[in-house]
Amino acid sequence: MAEYQDVIMAGFGGQGVMLIGNLLAQAAMEHGLEVSFIPVYGAEMRGGTANCTVVLDSRPIGSPLVREPLSTIVLNEPSLDKFQPRLRKDGVQIVNASLIREELVDKKLRSVCIPANDMAHELGNVKLANMVALGAWLRATGALPLTAVQEALRRVVSAHYARLIPVNAQALEAGYNFARRAAGQEA
Amino acid sequence: MNASQKERVLIKGNEAVAFGAVDAGCRCYFGYPITPQNEIPEALSVLLPENGGAFVQAESEVAASNMLLGAAACGIPAMTSSSGCGISLMQEAISYMAGSHVPGVIVNMQRGGPGLGDIGPSQGDYFQAVKGGGHGDHRNLVLAPATAQECYDLMFRAFALAFKYANPVMVLGDAIVGQIKEPVRREPPKDALRPEAVMALAKDWRLEGYGGRGEGAAPRLLKSVYLAEGALAGRNRLLMEKYAAMRAECAFEQTDTNDAELIVVAFGSIARIARSAIRRLRADGRKLGLFRPVTLYPFPAEALRALAPGRRFLVMEQNTGQMVEDVLLALNGAAAVSWHGVMPGLFIGADDLTEPILRALKEKKQ
């Protein structure tokens, strides 16, 4: 497991980036890591993108924000525009290929282009796209075991939506498996 | 997962303030909403009634701060919270609390200013917090948390100090400290006073009617108006002695200062961001340390001065130059001091601080 990892997650308001940020942070804490989650909110929330940053480490977290992230999850084109230029050269980005044109993706960067909305639709609910993307991120970074995140769903999803936990766990797994197959093709 | 990890909860700094307040014995909250501190009243609106306390959303910050003055005058551990212009509106009541020897706890999760500013992080209220803020000669004890855990822990110290000195205490955070979610252990710090012990500190002055003192007991009066000739001078002398006694409460944290050539002085969120930058630069062999005041008033001047011989200092803060004045006063020429300001409203990371630190290191070699 990596000693230190950070990720910026970004998308339209409503795509659930805050939920997967919270989920990852909760899972990391339960896994015994130090972790910070911080939402960036403000005027941009009304217009287009919402984003949050999660930092994982074995040591206490200093900066909860990063200018040049080691990884990103970008769910829409405005988020790709904003964060792709800031991604570290040795970083990895999870790109929602359902909403982001392939020609916009910088070929010099390591990217996992995953049709998150389409896969979510196949699972029965397009709102699961965030979970599909987080699953791919877990495989691409190796930052936390898939099961740790699936397990943490019960603490993050409110009781009212508890019936949706199994399908969220499936969505995480579908994304994870997609990234594993993609990695196989790279090799 | 071991037992101690199970005890951690993932909460915002603002929520940690609320949990800390209730666990420290806070009985009343009065406030008016403003971003970026709204999770404090949100959490307390549930927690206080559950724990036998009272939550009031006032009609304004002016009203909220005067309600706090009233509750605290009765020896009740009570608090308010706000940000930016809301804290400015409370200054009249804060000055009255200081003038009347009344303990109020005020949390300021700073936002960008001046004026209405924005809702991003800022440390621009440093002067307002540590130099009094309201009219007349007065001082607040000022505590500056850097993590969600510290938001929880420092609420215990805030109530204990407010009652020990019968003086307003300000907890000075910012949008980052308030909005960050981190694991927090909800257990009182080892040196924390129990809530009953905090309340007992008020037994000689609180307004309680006859209280337990029996019918005919001497009336008590808390006031800040002293019109008789020489009376106000005496009052101010007394306050000055109190502020001098507060010097015993200085608190700070130092990291890697022993071998450091350059020590970064920073508080709150900028201190933790600087710690990441320093960690990275130390890995490259740079001799850097961090000095983080936890009490901003009293400022830990003696501890800073003790580090001066053979070292240089770099003050980093998210404003246009405030704490640097206290650092210059503390060092009084004993060491060179440079300054880097992050403009209010910006969200920065460690990457943004490495360059200025390297620049300050180079200045030394010249």
Image (cartoon, coloured by chain):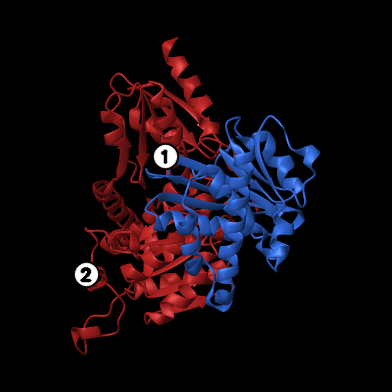
Secondary structure beneath dot 2 equals helix
Q: Is residue B44 above or below residue B324?
A: below
Q: Amino acid at mark 2?
A: Ala
Distance from label 2 to label 1 (Cα)? Answer: 44 Å
Q: Which residue is mark 1?
A: A3
Tell us which disc is closer to us: 2 or 1: 1
Q: Nearer the viewer, residue B127 or B77?
A: B77
Secondary structure beneath dot 1 equals loop
* Residue at (39% x, 26% y) in the render: B283
- How many numbered discs sit on the rendered protein? 2
Q: Is residue A173 above or below residue A103?
A: below
Position in image of residue B293 (x %, y %): 36, 42
Position in image of residue B17 (x %, y %): 42, 62
Q: Amino acid at mark 1?
A: Glu
Q: Which residue is mark 2?
A: B197
Q: Nearer the viewer, residue B150 or B285?
A: B285
* Residue at (31% x, 42% y) in the render: B252
Chain B hue? red
Specify whether B320 is left or right of B183.
Answer: right
Label 1 Cα crowd, 10 Å radius (few <14 / some 14-19 / many 20+): few
Chain A hue? blue
Residue B158 visible in this rendered orientation of the protein: no
